[in-house]
Structures are given as structure tokens and as C-alpha cells.
Image (tube, coloured by chain):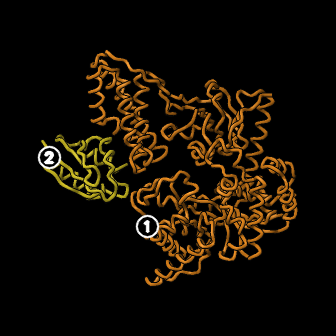
Amino acid sequence: MASAIVTIHHPVGLHARPASVFVRTAANFPCTINVRNLSGDSKMVNAKSILAVLTLGANQGAQIEIQTSGEGEEEALKALVELVESNFGE
Amino acid sequence: MTQPIHGIPASPGFAEGKAYCLAAGEVQVVKRTGCQPEEELARLESALRQVRQALEQDAARARTSVGASEAEIFEAHSLILEDPDLREQVRAEVEGERVNIEFAWQNNIDRYAKILEGMDNELFAARAADVRDVGKRVLWTLTGTKIDTLAGLTSPSVILARDLTPSDTIAMDKSLVLAFCTAEGGPTSHTAILAKALGIPAVVGLGAAILDIAPGSLLCVDGVNGRVLVNPDPSARAAFESARSAFHDRSKEELSHAHEPAVSLDGVHFEIVANIGGEKDAQKAVEMGAEGVGLFRTEFVYLDRAVEPDEEEQYRVYQSVMEIMGTRPVVVRTLDIGGDKDIPYLHLEKEANPFLGVRAIRLCLQQPEMFLAQLRALLRAAVGHDLRIMFPMVATLSEVRTAREYTEKARAELAARGIAVPKVQLGIMVEIPSTAVLADQFAREVDFFSIGTNDLTQYTFAAERVSEKMAYLSDPLHPAVLRLVQRVIEEGHKQGIWIGMCGELAGDADAVPILMGLGLDEFSMSPNAVPHAKAVIRQWSTAAARELAVRALDLESGEDVRALVRSTPPR
């Protein structure tokens, strides 16, 4: 299992386009990917589910933890961390 | 002669064409037990496949007809459609309880929508509508309900519907829409806003009876008076045609003179300016002949975001509007917002009566850092332009004085950074009766007044302006409001300041001659209303307008005032 903690800098938070891009990226990998909002209730949810990711309520400034486990876990983690750190490619 | 159906005029213009009836699509979900899970799940898979195809078509259509940002809505919908958690939970419910798929699907859609609706952050809560939208389309497919997203519109038509939502209208080919007629909705509904943006007529609030009109019926829509004729007889149709051609000739004629000033018969110039909310409106205002901006709403800078906009970001927004307006005067209203809007970073308390609570200037004076950042951004944007600052919802003299002190403080902060700001006019909105009553005292403190008739009417009659039931108490042409307007103008003029108006009343053709007669200097309205307002002013002399105003002030109701104006020929 691999995991990392990143901060959301995008003004809308993990919502709208950032949430969509995040979920689509996660869905490209075969491994299990979970995410939680350390600035919220810290419950782990499926990163491939847009509804679950929206319920995190991760605003701008929120710290999220991403956990990957299974085939391609390192690549998946790297891709998602880069995505968040690049401000979702904007 | 065929009698018209009456509704609320929501966007001006005339159109006739065949009715296209948008199916309401309400589906009652009944719970059944003892179902075969494999069969139920296979039906879901098939429905999801069909909806996915439809969404892809909608997205492609939206990309070509309205733009990429609207197409994103459908891409977000397809992500919800493919959500693995949602499907897993539906599957578990069908297998565990052997219920029908419609029930399990709707149950889970409701659950997610409720979670999202319950979130503190308005941005996230707004996604609940997307979830329900997707849920509805799948349910339609499952139950074989006729799916209708206006995507099936193939020939020019008048759209008939209960009410329209963005997902109803996004997929339609807008070049085929002649007009909108809805059973529900008010003048500020999505239908009204979209129709105005497209420049096509709309009549809303026509009542449920219009839903029984047969598809293909001939409809004649009068968006000026809020009337719709169904399959009119020849004489009714002829009357409609002549009204329609008169309206078109008039609009064309007025547009050709839109860039000339509005001067009364006796040579008095009245300033006709626009209400805007951003760059796009500013461009429209210039196109339609507005001589400036009488109300630049800055709320949009603060909405739909998780953190406060900083000075730099605001400066760029204000600056870009000032560039478009060039040397024309622009009155910018400082943040006018309160507890009816959920803005996460402002930490607003929920109030029982947000329109009577901490909003506008009251909020800004409680959050000085935010207020100062806006004032600095505005003062910087004033360099090289005629930018004027206006404070909303002022109720007492001490509020004006404090706001003025903050403006001076912002100016000093900029000076310390080496930015010299020219003198800027400071004014207030007059929209609370206390301020109208003490207009003489306020006039000594400011450079101008702008009368906000929407709120002034609501606070004068103690009637919520958004409530349909209170519509009879929301007429700004009522003599009670007009007398306050008269007082504000007179007292302001005694102190030598100029008086504008930026409420709906200023752009109301029936009100324009009365306001001329009361001596209003500046009329601010939606850009589309500018050419007609200018044309009305050119038909009147100030003396005749004054006589009309004096008579209006003695009437007993708004209807009486309107009847008086309509029966008095301009001179």
C-alpha cells in the first residue's frame, strides 16, 4: 500500500471540474484507491466514485490523504498527487 | 374573437409558431418485492447504456451550440451515471431485498442528493441537483416515460412547459426556439433569464391550463403584455399581427437612434445608463447606447468560490470593465450580500429574515478587512477612469460616515504603496425608508443618491419581493413609493447633488415620464431597455411630465398610476 497527503489549492476545492478530473484519473488505474479529508471527518471513501468524493466536502485549503493498494499503486499515487499539486492542470 | 391566456411578461417581443410541449416527466416510483435480481439488474444496465448515449449526444450538441463550459455539465452527469459506489449500493439493495430496480435506484439517488443538500458548503450542495437530474433520466428510461430534453426539437417552435431547468434547455437547438411559455415561474426564473439572453419573447406563470394545449397548436406569444393566443381566429390573429409589426418597427427605429442622447422636447438631457454584472454586460451596454453604468453589481466576484477574492483579483475584474466603458461614468456598488446567500468564507449566521439582517453595508462594516480590500481594488481601478463608489442599504448617517472613513483609509494605504488615486465620487443607494425620510441630512454627506426601487418597495410595504403571494404589494409605481422618490429627488437637488435610480422602475416605460417629471437625473436599467427608454424621453417635455407626475402622486394605487400614464398622450 502507498499513501500521501496533499493540500487542495484550487479555489473551488475538490468539486466541479477538479473533482471530475480527479475521479477520472483514479478510474484509469486497476488498483484500489481511497481518499479521505483530513480537514473533515476523515472517513475513507472510494476515489473512483464522484459521489463519494463530493461528500468529502474538501474545500480549498483542505488536506487530503490518498491511499492506493494493488496493481500499479505507485503510479496511481504519483499521478493523483501530481494532479492535485499542479492545481488540476489549470 | 379568441381570448388570450394571461401570464407574466418575462422577456419582451412577439412570436408565433407551433407549440412544442415539453413532457413534465414526473414518475411515481412504486416499491415491489419478490423480484428477480438478475432481471432487475439487466434492466438497469440497459437503461444506463441508453442514458449514456443520450448524454454523449447532449454534450456534443452543447459544445457546438452553447460552448464548452455548458458541455461540462453533461460530462459531470456521465460521471455520476458511471459511479461505482452508486451501482454497487443499488445492486446490494436489489439482491438483498429483492426489490424492483426503479425503487432501489431512486432510493439511492435520494440518499446521495440528501447528503449533498445537507452539506455546509453551497458549492457542494448545488451538486444535489445534478444527482437528481441524472437519477430522473435513468428513471424515465427504466419506466419507458417519454424522454424529452428539447434535444428532439427539429423545427422552429414555441416551447410550452411547466417550468424550465438548465438541463431542459441546454440540449436544445436555440436557433429553433421562437418563444417560451411556462405554467409556473416568475419574472426572475431560469426561463426569463435565458429568454432575455437569447433575445426571444417569454411569458411565464400562465397556469396549469396551458399544459393541456395540443402539440402543434398555433401559438401567438406577446412577451410585452404577457399574453398568449391559442389557435386564434382570423380577427384575433390579425390584431396580433399588427401589434407584432408595430413592435418590430418601433424596436428597429429605436435601435437606430440608441446612440443619440435622450433629450426631452424642451431640450433637457436625461442620462440613460445600464445595470451590469460584468464584462459581457458592459459590452452589451455600450452596444445598446448606454451613456455609462448606473449600477455595477460586484457580488459575482464573491460567489461560487471557497475563499475570499483578494485585492489583486478584484482589481483585474473591475479594471477590465472600466476599460470597456472607457471615459463613461461607472457607478460600482460595494458588496451587497447577506444571510440568504451561503458564502462559506464569510461565516454568515443564518437569520430568520435575511432581508432584514446583516447584509450589504452592515456586513461590510463588520468585516473591515474584506471591505478595505474591495475599496482598494476599486480606487485602483478608478485611475484614468470615472469610477464612482456606491454603498448599498445605508440606513443611518453614521454608516455613511464610517464607510467614508474606510474609503479614506483605503486611499491612504494605497498612497503608502505609492499609488495615487484621483478624487472619486461617493454615493449611497436609497432603498430603506429611513434614508428616504432623512434624505436632506444624507444629501449633505454624499456626492449622489441612487434610488433602489426594488428594495425601497419591499421595505415600504413590508412584503417580501420574492413571494408570489405578495405580488400585489410589490408595485414600485404605487404612490406610496413615488412620494418617497419625490422627496429624495427634491432634497438631493436642494443640496446640489445628482439623483439616479437603478431599480426595475427606471427601465419601466410607464414610469419613465413620471420620473422625468419628478426630476430624476439618471436612469439605470438593463442594457436591452435603453433604446426604448430614450425614445420615451424624447416624446415628452419636462413641463408635461411634471404635470403627469403631480397627478400620479395623488392617485391611490399603482394600477391607477399605470392607467393614467397609458391614457395620457405624450407631449
Identity of the residue furthest to the front in this view: B352
> In the picture, which quadrant includes the N terminus of chain B?
top right
Residue B425 x, y percent position in the rendering:
62, 75
The foreground one among B70 and B39 is B39
Pointer 1: residues within 10 angstroms few (<14), some, or many (20+)?
A: some
Distance in Å between CA atoms under marks 2 and 1: 39 Å
The foreground one among B386 and B94 is B94
Chain in yellow colour: A
Residue B293 bears which disc, if any? none
Q: Chain of mark 2?
A: A
Left or right: B430 as drawn, with respect to B164: right
Give me the residue at 82% from left, 68% from top: B267
The quadrant holding residue A26 is: top left
Residue B313 bears which disc, if any? 1
Give me the residue at 26% from left, 51% from top: A37
Q: Amino acid at mark 1?
A: Glu
> In the picture, which quadrant includes the C terminus of chain B?
bottom right
* Above or below, B351 relative to B484: above
Residue B503 x, y percent position in the rendering:
66, 57
- Of the chain colours in the picture, the one used for chain B is orange
The foreground one among B335 and B515 is B335
